[in-house]
Image: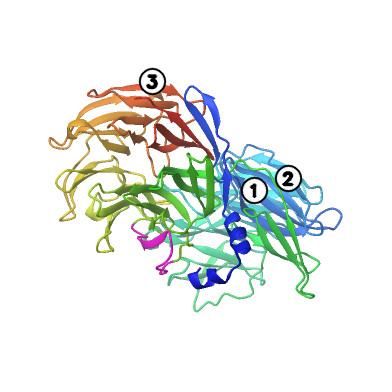
Amino acid sequence: MHFTTVKRLSWALILILCLAVPTAFAQTEDMGKGFKHHGVATPVSNHRGIVATVDGAGKPVALVWLFDHSGGYAILVLDADTGKSQQVPTPFPPGKDCPYASILSTKNKYYTHFNSYFSEFDPVQRAFTFHEKTAPQMAMSMTEDDKGRIWSASYPQGGLVSFDPKTRKLTDYGHVYPQNWNEYPRSIAADDAGWIYFGDGSTANQIVMFDPKTAKATPVIPDDQRSHGSGQVYRSTDGKVYGQANAGQKSDWYMFYKGKAIVIQNHVVKDVKNYIAGSQGLFHRDFPDGRRIKELDTVEKLFIVENPKTGETKEFKFEYTSEGAHIMGLAVAPNKTICGGTAFPMRFFSYDPAADKWTNRESYIQWNTVGMQGDKFFVGGYTGGFMLEWDPAKPWVKTEKGKADSNPLFLTETAPTINRPHRLLPHPEGKLVIMTGGPDYGFTGGGMLIWDRVAKTPTVLTDKELIPDQSTVSLVALPKGKLLGGSSTSPGTGGEKKAKEAELYVMDLATKKIEWHAVAIPGVQEYTDMVVGPKGLVYGFADRKLFFVFDPVKRQVVSQQPTETEFGLTCYQQGPRVFVRGPKGQIYVLFMKGIAVVEPGKFTIRMLAESPVPVEYGGDYLDGRIYFASGSHVYSYGVTE
C-alpha cells in the first residue's frame, strides 16, 4: 500500500487493519524435563477433492476431503442451504497418506483410494459405506465403466482395482505393470466393451491396455520408443478410448477398442465423455439444482454458494477439527523468531518466543528448506526449485515473480535441474547462498544453485557437473573457497534409481569444478546432514544411522559409529536439519528419540534428554533453547551446555 493511500485512511480503519494481522498467542505449555510445547504452526487443513451433490433429503451438499499432517482423516459435509457442517471420520487409518484422485459416480457415491484402502462414501447416508484393503498404495486416476464399476489406477507400481457397487465386490488385480521406478498412472478410461486403459509415467511414458476377463495387461509403446513423460487417455462418446503416447509432446495418438491399438493421424480431442473425477485438486462446483460453489476455503473456513441465474449468493462460515498442517522445517530468522513453512496448505509461520505469539500467512508454494544469512532469511522451495529472500524488517508483501517489491522476494528457479530442494547453505562469507536438491519428476540426478547476492545472478550446475545420477542432500563450507557435499542415490519423484552408492565430494567455488569425489563409506545411500566441527573436521550422518567424522585435508573418513541401536534414527525432512549449532560451538544432534550432543573433542555422542514427542523435523537454536517440530507442532528444549 502506498503512503499516499494510507494518509487518506481514518485512524479507526488503520486500527482495524492492524488488528487483522494474522497473529495468535500461543500459551506455551511446559512439558517438564526442559521441554516446552509452543502450539500448532498452521492449525487448519487442506482439501483433497471437493464435489457438489445432494444428500438423502435431496439437499445440496458439498463433500470435502480433509487433509492434515495425519493424512486424509475425514470427509466434511457442508449444507449449501444452511452452511451447517458434519465431519465424518475416515474408517481406516490415514497413515499420513491422502487422496490423489477421486470420483463421484453416476449413482452419487464418492470414491477414493489411498493408504492401500479403497473406500465409498454415500452422501445419502452421510456415511462411509465400504472400505477394503488393497495392494499398495493410492489412486492416481479413477473412472467408471459402462456397467457402473469403479476403477482405480494406482501408484507406485501400476496397480489396478475395480469395485462393483451392485455386488459390493472389490477386485484387486495387484500391480499389473511393475517398473523399477515409482509410476504415476495419471489417467484411466474404459471403452464400452469393458477394456481398461491407463496412461503411465514419469521416468518413461506408457499406455497400458487391460482385459478384466483375463487380467492381462499389455503395454502399447515399445521400450525402445519410450521417453521421459506420461501417456494419457480419455473416453469418447463414441464408446472408444483415445490416447497420446506422451502428453504435451509431439507423439503418436491411438484409438483403442477391445484391446486393439490403432495409430491415428492429426487427432483432435473432442466428444470427451466427462466424469466427475480428477486429481487431488478435484473441485466440482455445480449442484444438480443449478446453484454452484463460488468459494470453499478450508483456511478461511468460508463457504459461498451462488445462483448464476439470479446472481444471489449465500455466505457461510464453517468449522471442523484439524491437527494442523505438516511442517517442512524451521530455522531462526533475523528478527529472533522461529520461522518456516507448512505443506497442505502451503503456509508461512513465525513463532515469537519473547511474546509467545504466532503469525501465519499464505506462502509462495512449499518452503522445503530455510536458513538465515545476516539480516535476511532465505527459502528453497518446491515445486520449481525456487529461491526466495525475506527481509523481516520490512512489511510482508505477497510473493509474485517479477514483482520487485515482493517480500519475500522471488530470486530465481531451477527446475528441472532442481525441483525439490534438500539443502540451503547461506555461505558464511555472506556473499553466496547455495541450494541443492532433487530433479524434476521422472529425472535422476539433481544439481546446485549458487546465488550471488552482490551480482544478483544465479549459477546452476547439473548433476553431470557434480555427481552424475545423484542429488546433493548435505553441504558445508570449507576453508579457501571449497565446498564439501554429500549425495543421495534417490532419484527425483517418479525417477529411476541408477547409482549404487552415495558419495562425498569437494568442489572449488571459484572454478565450480569437482576436485575430488569418492564412495567414502561403502554401501551408504545418503549423506543425510553434515556440520563443521572442531579442528576443521566435518561431522556427519549417513542414512540417518551412521555417525562419521571426515577429514577434508586428508579426504578420508577418520571415524564412524553406528547410532541406531542406542539413539534410533535422526530426525528427517526433505530439507534435513539434524545438526544444531550452539553459541559456543556446541554441536547438538536431533534424533527422533531426543536431543543429544557431540562430546567436545571426542567422536562420541551423548543423549541429553529423551523427548516426550518424536523429534521429527529440525531444528535451530535461539536463546538457550533448541527448537524442533513434530507433526504439526513446534517444541523446544532448554540446553545448559
- In the image, is residue 568 above or below residue 294? above
Looking at the rendering, the stretch of residues picked out in magenta corresponds to 401-417
Answer left or right for 327 relative to 512.
right
| Magenta stretch holds residue 412 | yes
In the structure shown, which secondary structural element does the residue marked by tag 3 occupy?
helix
Residue 227 appearing in the image: no
Q: Main secondary structure of the magenta part?
A: loop
**Residue 600 appears in the figure:** yes
Residue 414 on image: x %, y %: 35, 60
**Residue position marked by numbered label 3 in the rendering:** 566
Amino acid type of the residue tagged 3 in the rendering = Glu
Tags 1 and 2 in contact by the CB under 8 Å rule?
yes
Q: Mark 2, residues whose alpha carbon is within 10 Å: few (<14), some, or many (≥20)? A: many
- At label 3, counting other C-alpha atoms closer than 10 Å, the crowd grade (few under 14, some 14-19, many 20 or more) is few
- Magenta highlight on residue 67: no
The tag on residue 87 is 2
Marked residue nearer the N-terminal end (3 or 2): 2
